[in-house]
Amino acid sequence: MSRPLLSKIRQFGSGQMYNRLSARMYASSGKESAREYLDKSTAPFEVFDRNAKRMQKDRAAARGVDSREVDYLKDEVASRVADRLLDIKRRYHTVVELGSGCGHVVKALDDDMMDKLIMCDISPVALSRDADATYDIEVERRVMDEEALEFEPESLDAVVSSLAMHWVNDLPGMMIQVRKALVPDGVFIGAMFGGDSLFELRTSLQLADVERDGGIAARVSPLTDTRDVGSLLSRAGLTLSTVDVDNIVVNYPSMLHLISDINAMGEGNAVVQRLPFIKRDTLLAASAIYKEMHGNEDGSIPATFQVIYMIGWKPDPSQPKPLPRGSGETSLGELFNSTSHKL
């Protein structure tokens, strides 16, 4: 690279010109245009195959009775999300649920909390599975991708999401869209699987892969760490954030029963770089490792589901704010001294 060109790059003081230069050099090879190269380089990193996830949810919901038999986990978490909404002493006109699936949160709601719930999901089959069911509130169903919300700015009183965000590629982008759609002082309440979920299954499959194939494959989806959720809410512009964690342990007869239920929930692996199959001997080896390392005394195996709950509010002047620095009227030193004398 010539010195005049280097001096121009230093003069701009950012990587923008270098990116454009790289785009022109890459486009000159005939592979793709400069615009296509820049669009690809600035797009969110794609971890999950959203189309595959939609088909998984479609297939799971189409199984009817089998699909309803595995609602136990999503119903439990949805009821806890509804409890957090109930703790807010407000009555809402319209609430939106993102990634509603077959309808789990709506089962725990009543007309004292809101008038209407808009259920949004990428799977039309899941949305229509329980279309004949009756609820205490009005329900509207919309086919909508959580990564591309279709709501007017400042049009929603509250948004909830239960066990759907762990399949979103661009979580900050989704949360920013939620914040824009909320009215001032509107609330977002979410629940998603955390990084310690299914650690027993993850470690068993990894050890089996190493033993049988000499490497590790992407068998279980990557999940968000609890420590990152607070930063996620702040980055999206939500305030007064609250984060807490629950560990739900479910016992299964075997690892194969666990995998069967996961697939029936529509929660199968949707990582872009996933392998299309797992060999029978690797699967049996993982099942034996699971039972040996984590098995219960009665022969069953535990599966841990870590659930991260989060609450964030859209900023509003009416919200409480910390007092300015130095505005205190009592010294902590005096307070501690007076307390020590009394003791």
Image (spheres, rainbow, N blue to C red):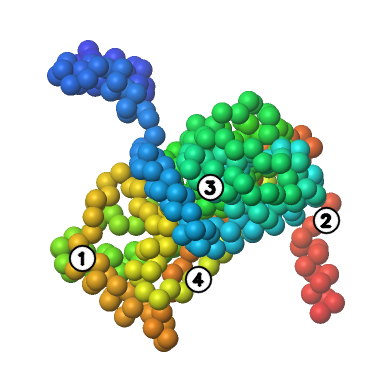
When the figure is inspected, residue 149 is found, relative to residue 204, above or below; the finding is above
Q: Nearer the viewer, mark 4 or mark 3?
A: 3
Residue identifier under label 1: 280
Separation of residues labelled 1 and 3 (CA atoms): 33 Å
Tell me which numbered mark, 2 or 1, is placed earlier along the sequence: 1
| Residues at circles 2 and 1 in contact by the CB criterion of under 8 Å | no
Tell me which numbered mark, 3 or 2, is placed earlier along the sequence: 3
Residue identifier under label 2: 330
For the C terminus, the image quarter is: bottom right
Residue 336 image offset from top left, x and y in percent? 77, 67
Q: Nearer the viewer, mark 1 or mark 3?
A: 3
Tell me which numbered mark, 1 or 4, is placed earlier along the sequence: 4
Residue identifier under label 4: 249
When the figure is inspected, residue 181 is found, relative to residue 194, above or below; the finding is above
Mark 3, residues whose alpha carbon is within 10 Å: few (<14), some, or many (≥20)? some
Tell me which numbered mark, 1 or 3, is placed earlier along the sequence: 3
Residue identifier under label 3: 129
Total number of numbered discs in the rendering: 4
Q: Quadrant of residue 298?
A: bottom left
Separation of residues labelled 1 and 4 (CA atoms): 27 Å
Residue at (28%, 23%) from the top-left corner?
37
Q: Amino acid at mark 3?
A: Arg
Q: Amino acid at mark 2?
A: Thr
Q: Is residue 168 visible?
A: yes
Tell me which numbered mark, 4 or 2, is placed earlier along the sequence: 4
- Which of the labelled discs sits on residue 51, or is there none? none
